[in-house]
Image (cartoon, rainbow, N blue to C red):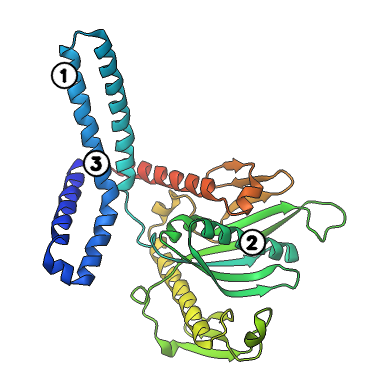
Amino acid sequence: MFDKLEDLLMRYNEIIQELNSPEVANDQKHFRQLMKEQSDLMPIVEAYEAYKKANQTIEESLMMLEEENDEEMKGLLKEELAQAKEDVEHLEQEMKILLLPKDPNDEKNVIVEIRGGAGGDEAALFAAEIYRMYAKYAEANRWKVEPVNINENGLGGFKECIFMITGKGAYSKLKYESGVHRVQRIPVTESGGRIHTSTITVAIMPEAEEVDIQLDMNDCKFDVFRASGNGGQCVNTTDSAVRLTHIPTGIVISCQDEKSQLKNKDKALKVLRAKLYEIECEKQHSAEAEARKSQVGTGDRSEKIRTYNFPQGRVTDHRIKLTLYRLDDIMNGDLTEVIDSLITADQAMKLSRLQKEA
């Protein structure tokens, strides 16, 4: 581990020197690449330098304790030594986590697909609430939310909802949300006061760049139609909505959120690229099935991941056996505790796997 850390420190110092070079300053593309690499290396370099400083403090404190006769001074040195040992232990763990292989999709924007499952209108109403939960979480992180296609059921619920979340690190946090979300409550349509269980499916897909997926436009068929639902005067009077069919896979995407047909076409293509990229990733993941078993959630949209129990005010994440009695806060977009717990559990599992392989 320490050889690798020394190599990273050396590379970090090389980047600093390169960034000060006039030649690099004149090449903006190379300059941006170096700035990104520096930004990626900074957390591990800072942790390693703090680790070395804490180790130096331990050595100096031990030497001074041997020579010191004053009891008060000895007490201060012992406190300093204990703190430095604690720092070393904490920083060692932090560096191990920072050295874990990075998911290449972590910094990408995401495309979210929410579909009502078992439970009819109640599932659709819950799908709309989950959409609002993610929208509020995105807002708290200063990410941008853009609807792509929303298929309403007439009661304010969503049969299907596709939207984009744009912002730094969006996929790194939201990737754990793929799967089946279950709600337990008394539906507004239930006159007998019985608790019903309904489900929705969430799929989180990283936005695919053109370099990730080479899309042949000859494989794409576009149909235009008049948008329906709420959308203002212009939306419903022009053929602005777009239906995109990918002929080889049969994937169909509708987009009617924008007033402009071109903008709807562009959004539909983004969703298609994300879906095709997800298919490619699944092919790779099936070859790494054992490795994925040790991760928190496989990203499989059929996996039951979470239950929202309204009568008890409880949210339970079944993958890490986390139960929180903060349902209202979570439904209002306060997902930080849930997502941080999932990230921590995922990192712990990956570390454990690496130690077994070592």
Q: Residue at x 24, y 46 (%)?
A: 45
Dot 3 or dot 2: first in sequence order is: 3
The Cα–Cα distance between marks 3 and 2, rounded to whole angstroms, is 44 Å
Label 2 element class? strand
Residue 279 location, x and y as percent? Answer: 45, 70
Chain-order first, disc 3 or disc 1: 3
Tell me if residue 275 can be seen: yes
Q: Which residue is mark 1?
A: 63
Residue 342: % across, % down: 48, 47
Above or below, 149 relative to 124: below
Splitting the image into 4 quarters, where does residue 39 fall?
bottom left
Hey, what amino acid is under mark 1? Met
Q: Secondary structure at mark 3?
A: helix
Q: Which residue is mark 2?
A: 200
**Three-letter code for the amino acid on which mark 2 is drawn:** Ile
Numbered disc 1: secondary structure: helix
Q: Which residue is mark 3?
A: 48
Residue 88 in picture, x, y percent from top left:
28, 32
